[in-house]
Image: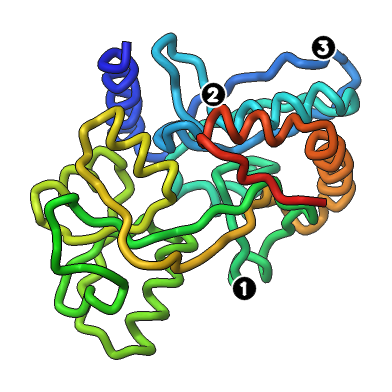
Amino acid sequence: MKKRLLSAILLAGALLAACGSDSDVASTNANNNDDAKKVVIGTGSQFINICFYDEDGNLTGYDIELLKEIDQRLPQYEFDFEVMDFSNLLLSLETKKIDVIAHNMAKNPEREEKFLFNSQPYNAVPTHVVVNEKNTDIQSIDDLNGKTVGLAPTSNAALFVEDYVEKNNMDTKLTYITSTPDILNQLKTDRIQAIFQFPFSVEIFNRESDAQLKLVGEPLIFSEIFFMLNKQDEQLAADIDEVLVELIDDGTVKELSEKWLGADFSVEL
């Protein structure tokens, strides 16, 4: 079963990488209300347990299932999911091809200047330096001097690492990789020496693809996670927040977090 799941994920990743900005659209079909306002949710398919295709080809994961729950409680909206490469999400939101980004997004000044975040975070996760399990040279971010590291372009971890390397005058080569299988393979074959990930991601990658990863050092960032919208969509953001509070209060967010992320990363009200 796991081998079939991994094959489906890798195939989906390969297809998306080949297609570039091509995307797929899927409706939640939650409300069946002809008067409902359509909301296009931009997301990805390579973030295992956050947003990915299962072995039956269904888009699922923590972010996806949480949004389905939100959609069920907002009959005035109909959520559709549009799947695209992570690097295309911000531009698609800026050009209004999508209305919301759901991809484990954290705040940073550049994003806050351009976009609107809803007020209530729906989880909060730590980011660590991650290396091959056989690596004994790297114990923290300060040991990355003279090393090559892999980063997801425009990610919050990338912005943090770029700033840290510059401020500390580190001779660290930064390489940007959009494909999850590619970045894991490069780390395993020592073409890069470190990446930056969440603990639940490391567990999943090790279990599903024998990635041979381990966490090192203290958390670099402890990020609260939000949905991203365009500045003018304040009402939509407020409506999402209202339902999020309900879902946190009734334990739904906790349940989804434990199911998909292996622990309760929900944020207390």
Residue type at the position of mark 1 = Pro
Element type at marker 1?
Answer: helix
- Which residue carries the number 3 mark? 32
Residue drawn at 78 percent across, 26 percent down: 71
- Viewer-side residue, 143 vs 23: 143
Q: Quadrant of residue 246?
A: top right
Residue drawn at 20 percent across, 72 percent down: 173
Cα distance in 3D space between marks 3 and 1: 38 Å
Rendered-image quadrant of the N terminus: top left
Which numbered disc, 3 or 2, marks the residue that appears first in the sequence? 3
- Which residue carries the number 2 mark? 60
Which numbered disc, 2 or 1, marks the residue that appears first in the sequence? 2
Residue drawn at 53 percent across, 47 percent down: 89
Q: Position of residue 50 (x, y in %)?
A: 51, 35
Q: Is residue 63 left or right of residue 122?
A: left
Element type at marker 2?
Answer: strand
| Colouring scheme, one of rainbow, by chain, secondary structure, one colour | rainbow
Q: Is residue 10 left or right of residue 50?
A: left
Element type at marker 3?
Answer: loop
- Viewer-side residue, 41 vs 172: 172
Closest to the camera, between mark 3 and mark 2, is 2
Q: Position of residue 101 (x, y in %)?
A: 62, 45
Residue 109 numbered tag: 1
Q: Position of residue 62 (x, y in %)?
A: 58, 32
Q: Is residue 229 visible?
A: no
Residue type at the position of mark 2 = Thr
- Viewer-side residue, 87 vs 206: 206
